[in-house]
Amino acid sequence: MAPVTVITGGGRGIGAATARRLAHAGHHLALGYRRDHAAAEAVVAELHAIGVRAVAVPADTRDPDRVAALFDAAEEFGPLTGLVNNAGVTSPIGPLTELRLDDLREVVDVNLVGYVLCAQQAARRMTAGGGIVNISSVAATLGGPGEYVHYAAVKGGTDALTVGLAKELAPRGIRVNAVAPGIIRTDIHALSGQPDRPERAAGRIPLGRPGEPDEVAAAIAWLIGPDASYTSGAVLRVGGAL
Ligand code: NAP
């Protein structure tokens, strides 16, 4: 039976690149998104052309009912086997003293509460084992000083969620891992007020350039796939040695 995987934030960036990779590996896919319906539908059209079943579902991961609807849509394709917990946001770059309460709450709600709600749904529905990959960040260990300490703190939470859930779900044959990207060329930097951040940061990345979404997707696809059958509780850094 073909694997069936939910990708949150599958319409753009790392999530969309992961959808393409997993479709080539034969996964049927349910892609969640928040606002950008056209982007998500365009990715679904590409997935159909690859030959898998796919659907785009408006599913703000802060809303438990929409999260449940996303997983219901995936189960139309067969028993759920995978979750890529990817939908994430940043906020304007700056020192912690300037952080606005609304921005802090949004970062916590999307990047932590949303991840937990999705992991809960996945864990309840994966009755015959499966794989979860949480998208963390190198910020979890670097700390993001002067830029986004609150985001780094939440991504540290992603790593703890990964380790704990890996142990809790191992007896049920569910593996849980994380990928921690460095600075990747996606639209997320525009949200933080610095669309050209990847290029400007290149000088401090040991490999000398920002990463591409597909380079992160490759790691996600490996961790969720059968070649990682004994890998669980790992946080895999994909950051050009950052
Ligand atoms: P992106 O290009 O901005 O795409 C974000 C995706 O998440 C979009 O599909 C967006 O939906 C969706 N999304 C945002 N908030 C959502 C919500 N509340 N509910 C449901 N979907 C939501 O971001 P990205 O760079 O690919 O980031 C993906 C993940 O990688 C995030 O967890 C991020 O923290 C992490 N990461 C990124 C980098 C980087 O440099 N890019 C580095 C480290 C970690 P819409 O299209 O509808 O807006």
Image (tube, rainbow, N blue to C red):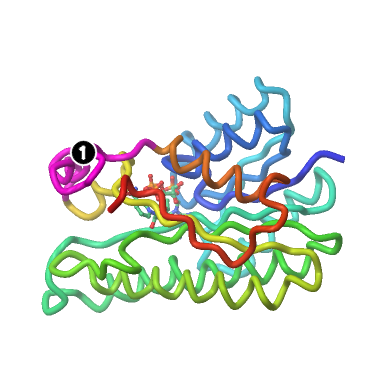
* 127 horizontally vs 211: left or right: right
* 112 horizontally vs 74: left or right: left
* 5 horizontally vs 95: left or right: right
Splitting the image into 4 quarters, where does residue 102 fall?
A: bottom left
Image position, residue 216 (x, y; %): 45, 43
Image position, residue 92 (x, y; %): 19, 61
Image position, residue 191 (x, y; %): 26, 52
Element under disc 1 = loop
Residues 110 and 130: in front is 130
Q: Quickly name the residue at label 1.
A: 208
Q: In the image, which residues are magenta?
A: 194-212
Splitting the image into 4 quarters, where does residue 176 fall?
A: bottom right
Task: Decide: is 79 above or below 144.
Answer: above
Task: Decide: is 88 above or below 105.
Answer: above
Residues 33 and 180: in front is 180
Residue located at (75% from left, 46% from top): 4
Residue located at (83% from left, 52% from top): 79
- The type of residue carrying mark 1 is Gly
